[in-house]
Amino acid sequence: MAQALQLLVPFPKYQLQPMRLLHTKTLKLEEFYTDIPPYAILSHTWEKEEITFQDIQNLEVAKGKAGYAKVENACKRARQYNFDWIWIDSCCINKESSAELSEALNSMYQYYEDAEVCYAYLSDVSGKIHPRDAGSTFRSSRWFKRGWTLQELLAPSYVVFLDQEWVKLGTRWNLRDVVSAITSIPTRVFENGDIDGFSIAQRMSWAAYRETTRAEDQAYCLLGIFGVNIPPIYGEGAAKAFMRLQQEIIKISDDRSIFAWVASTNTPRGLLARSPYEFRLAGDILASDAHAIRGKSSFSFGNNGVHISLGMRPLDQKRLDGVFYASLDCKSAKDPKGRYFTVFLLPMKSPQEEWRRVCADESFLANRPPPHTLFDITVKEPSVLRRKNWKPVRGQHVRVHTKLLLSAEDHFSYTQWVESSPSLAVDFLDDSTFRVALQHENRKSVWELIATNYQSLSREDSFSISFNPAHVPGYKLVTDIAPAGAPEKQTFGFDPYVDSVTKSFKNGGVVSVDWEMTGDRSERLLEVGYVSKNDPNTPFFLQTPTRSPGIGFTVPTKVSHPFCELTLQEVYPRSRCITESDSEDWNHFIILDPPSFALSQSCHVLTYKVDLPKQGHVTSSQPPRYIQVAVGFHSATAWVGVTSGKENAARVWERYPLAEHHPPSAKLKLEAETHELDFVFSVHGFKNKQQGPHILDCTVSRPGELAPGPIGRILGRHFRRRSGITTAEKALQSP
């Protein structure tokens, strides 16, 4: 009788990793398992000689490295606002411990979410030019291009941007329009802090153009944004890490927008994307409607792929025999017709056991969803909501200090406190401090205000800062500025996420009020500043908020014609939103978003080189010509302008101010060796979602001859014939 062989394998005991915080005065690390004290947190991009966990153990060694100045300045900033503790990723995580590193990566979002304040240090930004200025380095900062800083921008309740000299540039809230224009994240994310209200595809698109040092971090840096956890496996590759991320998301969500991606090639694929870049065009895809899928909204991932119920309709074409188009039941926020995001599927076995997505580099919007086939349902798991570890308590007292900065001390002085509601137990401790108990956040308490009045030394201007001690997210007292005097109910409107307000005066000056978080949760500091009309930064406080990107152009990089050939040489200004297609068939186009609407000009100048082809067997002896085409928007209406010559593109760009209106088409005449050529450039809406909302067309003809069709449309039809898109469009129009 054979004996059973027993193997006794010791099971590793799991040990909870503590959170380490750095003391801002002694620069000593201390571990916390529970009762974590209030702390500030630093967000930065790594540079040479960062201070590591091992370095901080010996301050003499740490002081010899370049990164010590960053740690010292971050602690100095935190101490200035009474923080005893700060968290800095470079020195608070022991990266030599794989277990600690794994837990830190999965807890990173929570670390930033629970921090009282996040200091975003932009080492490559100078505060001498305001972020709203066209020449500011704020817009091109490396901080906005890194993968890990996305969650560091979204997670904290309060974010302060600091320049390379550690001078405050502003907060996430009062620079939300500029940050939105840079990141393509809607401003309402920074106004109410809700990212869970956006579809999976939209949140993925925010990371599409961000970079990470380690390839796998493209997936790991998104864990907290989607509220999932996976163990990091460095070396598995970016695609596998991103696949594992999506598999975890599928377990807690039935949002089908996770499949609304577009590849760079038309290689047959499954339903999961390979990288955040494939969601680059999904910024306006809404979440799927679970109620419209007849109880079949759930799907799952098994060992042989994604198990999902899809409504499909076959394409009635011999050339694409067996191909189906399938609706994902999610719509585009920008599509007024309410059409559905649709993909192509092809069965790989008979009967139809396995499917593949074909033409993965294309997507289109179907006029109506195909009929849904009913399958057995699966049990849906509810999502786990995020919650802060510490919450303010109703009735808890807080002291508020108002402080006039040096810029305001020379212009204003305190006059009096005004209490608008006798129900509030307010203790006025001195001219700059009051103590009040926090109230519930509701409409009844929103008008229980406290106000402090200030009068200018010249007696010309005065203002009142009003407070609402509501129990709000982020534990911030709501603030507003109004003319001095007792607050009136109909005068004020409050937003719990406002942390900075401004008011302009008739003399051209601007007063600003900013909340600053402190290390003591029972205290808050309010800093009052003033900018005179002679200060060059004044116009930026009064400037109309920047509009977020979202309207753009598809422009050809090369146009071939029997009469000539146009090649794109330069795009000015060069924007990070320019993305060249990797598709072999679509290498004729780039997708181009306009520059920030905060600029006085809102357009791009395209410089095309015009080459004349061979005449018979003789190559044209004329030197190449140059055409400069300006494309832009006026009140969301696309326009185009054209000129010849190789003038400096920046000068051409300056000739097209935002305030002027230009036509949607422009004509130019060029003389060739034996004839003249007429060039007509026009812009119009384009329905193919991959190519963007507007497309630039060019027609070339000889005077008196019939002009051929637009080159852009010819190329578009040529590609659609090759990929089967025209067939799909016909099928969608059939009953």
Image (cartoon, rainbow, N blue to C red):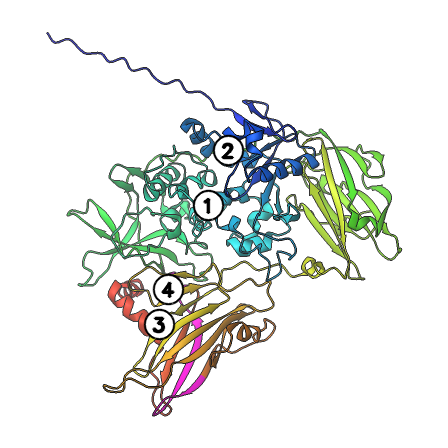
- Image quarter for residue 615? bottom left
Q: Residue 147, which numbered label? A: 1
Q: Amino acid at mark 2?
A: Thr
Q: Secondary structure at mark 2?
A: loop
Residue 355 is left or right of residue 40, and the answer is left
Q: CA distance from mark 1 to mark 3?
A: 33 Å
Q: Which residue is mark 3?
A: 558
Going from the N terminus, do you reach mark 1 or mark 4 first? 1
Going from the N terminus, do you reach mark 4 or mark 2 first? 2
The residue at 62%/46% (across/down) is 162
Q: Residue 76, which numbered label? A: none
Q: Which residue is mark 2?
A: 52
Kindly report which numbered mark, 3 or 2, lies closer to the viewer in this rendering.
2
Q: CA distance from mark 3 to mark 2?
A: 50 Å
Q: Are marks 1 and 4 in contact (CB under 8 Å)?
A: no
Image coordinates for residue 6, horizontal then vertical, percent: 22, 11
Q: Are marks 3 and 2 in contact (CB under 8 Å)?
A: no
The magenta-colored residue range is 668-692
Looking at the picture, tell me which residue is in the foreground, 405 or 198: 405
Q: CA distance from mark 3 to mark 4?
A: 19 Å
Q: Which residue is mark 4?
A: 688
Q: CA distance from mark 4 to mark 2?
A: 49 Å
